[in-house]
Amino acid sequence: MRNRHQRWKLRQGKGVNKAFVLMLGITVINQRQHVGLQKLSALAAVGHAALGPNKRYKFIQEETTGDSILAGSCLRILENLDVTTCTVGQLVHETIRAHHKIYRTGSGCLLFFAGAWGQTALLCLQQGIPAKQVVAALSEGIEFCIDLCKKSSISFNTLFGSPQKQDKEAVMDFKDWKGKKKVKLSRHFYDSKPESSPVQEPCLADIAHLADTLSHGCDEAMHLVVQASQIQSKATPNSGFDVTKFTTCMLPGLSEDLAHVCPGCVVLLNTEQTFVAHRLKAKPLNVVFILGDLSHTYRHLGFKQPAVEQHVSDHLGLSDLNKEQMWMGKVLEILSHLQIDLVLVSGLVNELVIQHCSKQLILVVGKVRMSVLKEMANAAGAISVTYATQLSQQCVGKNIQVSIWKEIHSQEGTPLTAVKVNVSNCNRFVTAVITSPVIGKMLDLEDHFWSCAYRVHHALKDKAVLSGAGIIEMLCISHLKKKAEVHNPKNGICASNPYIGIVFLFLADSFTDYLSTVMANSTGIPLIKARTALNEKLQDIKDISIDFSALLLDSDGGCQSSKVYDNLSVKQESWSRALDLVLLVLQTDAEIITGLDERKQDSLPGLIFL
């Protein structure tokens, strides 16, 4: 449906913003200033609507065909915009995609701060601050905030302890930090003494409570996560929360209220696959596992064609169609020789493969989650391979059956069948069944489920959480302003970087912009009103060790006491990647040779020499 090399336009409400190439035409780009940073800030602004618990959807429409896609996150927006014409756009997309692949949450925060800190760097350059000093001050400021996150984290011992202990330990005494010396091991890690007591392992009830505090407005999705955890615990007591054995199945055309979780691995089949599934149900099957796509053009990540490689063949001038047919014939021959009934693939499957295999009564299922597929292969005693041509007898698995789970009809009347893949030696697989009458919304609902699942996963992995609702960002604002005042040249303090105070103030403003945007999206109030309410609340902070609950903002600008938590590692990594992205764009443009004579810069007003 979508051509990545075509241009799309972006619709939100009544206003129209065009896709990336056209979007930059709306944003005024000063060619005499740092173009890369301007493009970074302009692109980051597209994702502002995806911040906060109440995200606003965007329709992305292809200009020539009129096809449209509904996107509810910055990742889905970037995936459907044409960024091939801009290196900054490609860099941003790859950064967001890499972060999402690991963490499944925090991409909106990453994109926002990449744009905000890019704007900070641009403002510094406009004021005549050398790029080297900007880089040093930005790095120092963000490293300080990342370290502040670590020191402000709430351990599980505190979180799941008695209420009196929580209230006592949740308030951090930041004055004692100054006397502690830290040896810097790398940019984001510092040596620290291990806790004297072991970290408390949460029970099932604790996980449910933790999940509730990490839902961030996605209550329905987090409820599915809690149910999945309960199913896992019932199947294998005291085994813990294992997100690697979660999978999803999307059933279109049904009400969202019908979403639920069920034990096992459930997959949706088309009409051709359904016929084969009925023939194979309740029978012991021979199964093989493919890591990657199942097509003749697929090559594994990192594959590079040797420059000196020569092909010798009896068939001259083979076309791509002939090559595909020869490959298909070889694969069918291997599958028939091994008497394979079921092929599970982690990637995409060529439609021609499904058609040919269905005629041979071989069921081919694609898009099986990688971690689930590997676990199934281990349970079935099989060796997974990358290419179907690598299959041998050692790759054939046993002890797997398929059963018809549910049969429904799509909105177009097409029959759809979902089957459950049963593994006799493993009963910890859990499937979240995602339903919606709006097909374009299903991918976003699936993203919500994975975001919630991985928030719980990262919290359990970190064995600590951060106070949410903007508390950490407000602490960063307060500390950055205090450090900026300390480094004010008027105070007579000689610092190695005389511009560090200015940069810290800009950084504090970027955190204020972030909280204001989240608050405006969450409550529906104008951005300027949200920023005013936030500044008023920040002025009320007299003591930095003030109770966290007294800083939570509600929609009326007042305070409310509630328990909302963020992930420690996700926030640290989001800020770190955002900084790396800004510095990379800054460094890349700084190394471009303009061909202009620096001695003649007086005749070119507004030009900044990096």
Image (cartoon, rainbow, N blue to C red):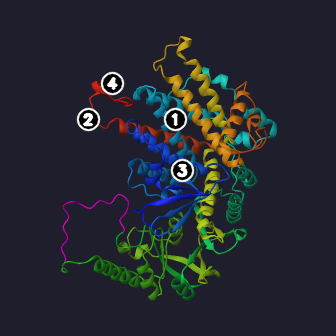
Is-magenta flag for residue 171? no
| Amino acid type of the residue that numbered disc 3 sits on in the rendered structure | Val
**Front in this rendered view, residue 426 or 446:** 446
**Viewed as shown, does residue 44 lie left or right of 242?**
left
State the separation of the CA atoms marked 1 and 3: 32 Å
Q: Which of marks 1 and 3 is in front?
A: 3
Q: Tell me where residue 604 sits by quadrant.
A: top left
Q: What residue type is labelled 1?
A: Phe
Which tag is nearer the camera, tag 3 or tag 4? 4
| Tag 2: amino acid | Gly
Image quadrant in which you'd find residue 329: bottom left
Residue 298 placement (x, y as % from top left): 37, 68
Mark 2, mark 1: which one is toward the viewer?
2
Q: Specify the quadrant of the image occupied by residue 330.
A: bottom left
Q: Label 4 near label 3: C-beta < 8 Å? A: no
Q: Can residue 339 be seen in this view?
A: no
**Counting other residues with Cα less than 10 Å from the Cα at mark 3, is it few (<14), some (14-19), or many (20 or more)?**
many
- Mark 4: amino acid: Asp
**Start-end of magenta stretch:** 298-313
Main SS class of the magenta portion in the image? loop
Q: Which of marks 4 and 2 is nearer the N terminus?
A: 2
- Can residue 523 be seen in the rendering of this structure? yes
Q: Please give the residue where the numbered disc 3 appears in the rendered image.
A: 46
CA gap, disc 4 and disc 2: 16 Å
Percent coordinates x, y for residue 609 in the rendering? 35, 30
Decide which of tag 1 and tag 3 comes sooner along the chain. 3
Residue occupying image coordinates x 46% and y 21%:
497
**Which residue is denoted by mark 2 in the rendering?**
595
Q: Tell me which numbered mark, 2 or 1, is placed earlier along the sequence.
A: 1
Q: Could you tell me if the residues under marks 4 and 2 are in contact, i.e. CB atoms within 8 Å?
A: no
- Mark toward the viewer: 4 or 2: 4
